[in-house]
Image (tube, rainbow, N blue to C red):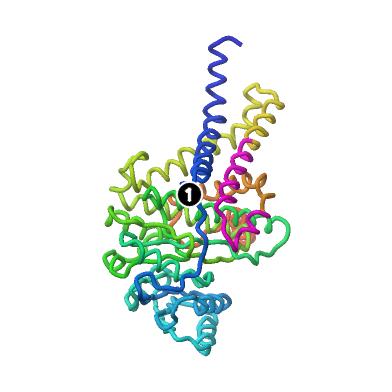
């Protein structure tokens, strides 16, 4: 092989194979290095027994309800179990069109002694943004927190969230740390996916969003559990109902309107969400998240104009990481089979595929090590016992990547909707429709011929 051919080959393999590995590896290594150098340390979840400024403020928790009969009880029980003065808690359950026994579940909870206020509000508009906006207008607390009806709170979640605001006057909004509920069940593939999901969530909130917060570049306040200063929330246009990413939209509006203030994650304010029930649900969730991200960026052109190296909040930086740098994954999906037609021996293709996967296993090992250095009880045992997910995480992330890529495509091809139908179900539905239509069309043709 002469020099030009060698350079061409090196450039081809370098661009599509080594560059993505180096970029992903550098990001993972930077997180680990910062942790080793103690720029990021463990933040234990400690009960707070003394009010930060001598007096606990009032708190309103907004719980949007839609067909939540099976989960609402556990959610409200976790609110009642908070290590926070109950008389200072106001809980508003805002129903937005439930057709099940959600109100009965709420009524059962009203029978349980609670020193705070527990109210039910009904709205005719369906959709979480409408429910949250109605609740905001009824809220009386100094701090307003939104809580999904299918999550439960750690007993110290509210106190730790309030303490973070009381200690930092520049903190205007914060997201709690969302973890997968410890009572994960299931067998086979679904159990593997749920354990990978736990590792993914823990890293996302306790590592990724911590570093985003330090750089004042937090991209999304989690819709599952977030908190706001009352006066700051009322200075916004509230939650936007024109996008499926209403929580992301709110984050962007706060970042744009209050550039000198902080929007952060409070890792000691933990809530637990149920693991994903199926691959279909995972597909719908990740497609919705990705679609919402793109819709929100498009709706904020001033923020979108900031370059990837902008100091502070830059949505383009996230967009580059999610799309531009992810393009080699799309290319390799189709290039690997095509290499055989380009003259490469099958053994070379196999070695390249194995090397690529092995490199990402190493990167996942670095990611897991960072997680392990920052994990705190009660999640320590589960995270450490989940070491066996390291070689499986590259496959899990690859699967999730294609789900998110589908979300990018739906922005261009489909109308806005909360849920998304996975390709297998969509194909099955189309086939069933064809099978129903064809006999009718054939019968009509026979009648016309007769």
- In the image shown, does 237 or 145 lie closer to the viewer? 145
In the image, 257: left or right of 31?
left
Residue 376 within the segment the image draws in magenta = yes
Q: Is the magenta stretch mostly helix, strand or loop?
A: helix
Residue underneath mark 1: 40
Q: Quadrant of residue 366?
A: top right
Residue at image location 41% in from the left, 81% down from the top:
122
- In the image shown, does 201 or 331 lie closer to the viewer? 201
Q: In this view, does 330 lie above or below 65?
A: above
In the image, 133: left or right of 445?
left
Residue at image location 45% in from the left, 74% down from the top:
63
The picture places residue 362, in percent across and down from the top left corner, at 62, 39
- In the image shown, does 437 or 356 lie closer to the viewer? 356
Q: In which quarter of the image is residue 25?
A: top right
Residue 361 within the segment the image draws in magenta = yes
In the image, 104: left or right of 87?
right
Residue 441: tell me if it is visible.
no
Q: Give the range drawn in magenta.
A: 359-385
Q: In which quadrant of the rendered image does the N terminus lie?
A: top right
Residue reaching furthest to the top: 2
The picture places residue 8, in percent across and down from the top left corner, at 54, 18
Residue at image location 30% in from the left, 43% down from the top:
305
The picture places residue 269, in percent across and down from the top left corner, at 48, 65
Q: How crowded is mark 1: few (under 14 residues within 10 Å), some or many (20 or more)?
A: many
Number of numbered tags placed on the structure image: 1
Residue 73: tell me if it is visible.
yes
The picture places residue 191, in percent across and down from the top left corner, at 68, 58
Q: In this view, does 345 lie above or below 405?
A: above
SS for dot 1: loop
Q: In which quadrant of the rendered image does the C terminus lie?
A: bottom right
Q: In this view, does 349 lie above or below 207?
A: above
């Amino acid at each position: 092989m002469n020099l030009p051919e060698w350079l061409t080959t090196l450039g081809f393999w370098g661009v599509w194979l080594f560059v993505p590995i180096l970029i992903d590896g550098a990001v993972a290594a930077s997180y680990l290095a910062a942790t080793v150098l103690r720029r990021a340390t463990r933040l234990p979840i400690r009960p707070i027994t003394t009010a930060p400024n001598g007096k606990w403020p009032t708190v309103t928790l907004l719980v949007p309800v839609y067909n939540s009969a099976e989960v609402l009880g556990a959610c409200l029980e976790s609110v009642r179990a908070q290590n926070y003065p109950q008389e200072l808690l106001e809980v508003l359950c805002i129903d937005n069109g439930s057709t099940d026994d959600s109100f009965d579940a709420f009524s059962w909870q009203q029978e349980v002694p609670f020193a705070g206020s527990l109210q039910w509000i009904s709205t005719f508009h369906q959709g979480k943004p409408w429910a949250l906006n109605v609740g905001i207008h009824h809220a009386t607390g100094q701090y307003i927190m939104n809580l999904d009806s299918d999550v439960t709170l750690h007993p110290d979640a509210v106190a730790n969230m309030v303490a973070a605001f009381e200690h930092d006057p520049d903190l205007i909004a914060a997201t709690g740390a969302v973890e997968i509920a410890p009572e994960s069940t299931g067998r086979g593939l679904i159990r593997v996916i749920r354990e990978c999901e736990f590792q993914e969530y823990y890293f996302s909130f306790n590592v990724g969003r911590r570093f985003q917060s330090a750089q004042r570049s937090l991209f999304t306040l989690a819709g599952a559990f977030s908190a706001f200063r009352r006066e700051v929330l009322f200075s916004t246009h509230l939650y936007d109902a024109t996008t499926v990413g209403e929580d992301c939209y709110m984050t962007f509006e706060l970042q744009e309107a209050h550039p000198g203030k902080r929007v952060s994650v409070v890792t000691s304010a933990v809530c637990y969400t149920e693991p994903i029930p199926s691959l279909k649900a995972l597909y719908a969730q990740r497609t919705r998240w990705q679609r919402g991200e793109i819709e929100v960026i498009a709706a904020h052109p001033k923020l979108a104009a900031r370059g990837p190296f902008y100091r502070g909040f830059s949505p383009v930086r996230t967009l580059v990481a999610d799309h531009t740098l992810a393009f080699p994954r799309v290319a390799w999906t189709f290039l690997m089979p095509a290499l055989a037609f380009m003259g490469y021996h099958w053994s070379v293709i196999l070695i390249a595929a194995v090397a690529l996967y092995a490199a990402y296993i190493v990167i996942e090992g670095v990611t897991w090590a960072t997680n392990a250095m920052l994990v705190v009880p009660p999640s320590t045992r589960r995270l450490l016992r989940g070491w066996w997910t390291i070689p499986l995480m590259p496959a899990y992330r690859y699967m999730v990547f294609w789900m998110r890529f589908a979300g990018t495509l739906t922005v261009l091809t489909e109308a806005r909707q909360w849920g998304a139908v996975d390709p297998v179900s969509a194909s099955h539905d189309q086939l069933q429709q064809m099978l129903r239509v064809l006999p009718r069309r054939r019968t009509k043709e026979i009648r016309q011929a007769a």
